[in-house]
Amino acid sequence: MADDILKLSKKAAAMISSMPKSTRIRVVSHYDADGITAASIICKALYREGYDFHATLMRNPFTQGLERVSKEKNELVIFSDMGSGQIETIEQLNCKAIIIDHHQYLKSETSNEILQINANLCGINGNYEACGASLSYSVAKALNSRNEDLAPLAIAGATGDKQYIGSIRGYNKIILDEALEKGFLKQDIGMKLYGDSLFDALYYSVDPYYTGLSGNKEGIHELLGRLNLDEAVKIEELDDSQKRKLQSFLILKLIKNGCEKNILDTVIRKRYQSSMLQCELERFADLLDACGKGGDRSLGLAICLGDKKAFDEAVKLEKEYKQSILDELLRLEKDGFEEKKNFRYFYSGNSSLGGVIGGIATNFIFDREKPLLSLVRKNDETHISCRGNQHLVAEGLDLGFAMKEAAAKLDGNGGGHKIAAGAMVSSDKEKEFLDIVDIILSKQMKV
């Protein structure tokens, strides 16, 4: 429980504080919104204590990434939002390591030089109740209580990992409540709709994705003409009546598309504003995802570290990133998918976007009955990202186990959460991998 997280965080803080101030501490994290916020929390905390740091944001830590780290001369490496699935490799780094993770773990026991802080080992559900950023925040706060002002980054990480679906709960809720009480966050209720104009807001809306509007200029022209709304108006300039009219139409559109209630509930919901981060937290998380998966990971870290110029650059990058997503979603709508007995799958040209597209398509395009896998062939390897939904998880779905088990049988790597996971196998074993996954999912879903 939370007490176990606190005890382990204090151990991590002691481990960090035992290092001479001349030590340059290595930080390795994932490249999505949760990973970037987790890394930034650790980096800020280290800097405030007088330590230099070297941070790297990785897409895939299974092979080349950790091979590079193994060749460095590090005294302490802190892994955030990753590590529990790579623990055997980390144990061979010949240095001290702290693992801060919420994904499925390979083993609970580690060597003396490694401290593993994993939500799932502390009775906290890593799928919904804690993320890399919220656990990193616990370590930062244990290192120095003044780091409590980093709480907005922790909740932004949880938001980026979609842990607000079904309401923010568990360990994340503890951090959220404290941040609201101390004024680090302010709460309101609103719809996710932002952009330079109303037209831009609708055109670049990918999550939620509005079939016939997102990425569709003609559809937007027709709608706004029918609703008598100015395309060039800024969202904040709409009056209450205009907002209600637009929101009612968009919600109805999602309902007609068969969108699940738990996803509908996320469209108009409690939202959290942070003056430190310059915007609402889901907006901030979207910017970080655009940086991490759109090709400029350091820009995302710079935003979290308070670089205001980087924020403006990220807004420009985000449009290019979202256009790439829209192109693939529109293609998926047009061309459809391939199918096995227990899952659907499609091929993508971008390994960084596969999971993003799969998650959006699962929630807003396809029905809830099967998980969706995206496959990307790259350098004789096939990278797989898969997404499910809470309905399927309640029925027994565990994609993290399926990816880990199937990949391991074929000398690949895999893992993640029950609802979202990934894997990598040799391309010549792709068909066999899909067959094995189909068998595993059949057993899980008792089909």
Image (cartoon, rainbow, N blue to C red):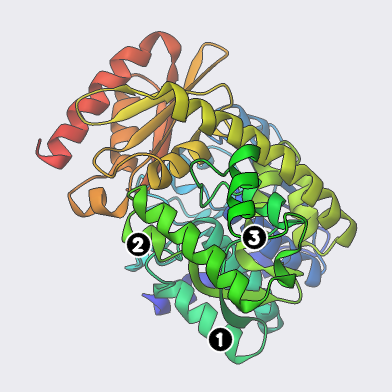
Left/right placement of residue 442 relative to residue 265 reads left
Three-letter residue code for mark 3? Asn
Image: 35 above or below 121: above
| Mark carried by residue 262 | 2
Q: Residue furthest bottom?
A: 181
Query: How would you rate the neighbour count of disc 1 (Cα within 10 Å): few for under 14, some for 14-19, many for 20 or more?
Result: some
Report which quarter residue 292 is drawn in. Answer: top right
Spatial CA distance of label 2 from label 1 is 25 Å
SS state under label 2: helix
| Mark carried by residue 228 | 3
Report the residue marked by disc 1.
178
Image coordinates for residue 55, horizontal then vertical, percent: 73, 49
The answer to whether residue 30 is seen in the rendering is no
Three-letter residue code for mark 2? Asn
Image: 212 above or below 170: above
The residue drawn where x is 47% and y is 40% is 86
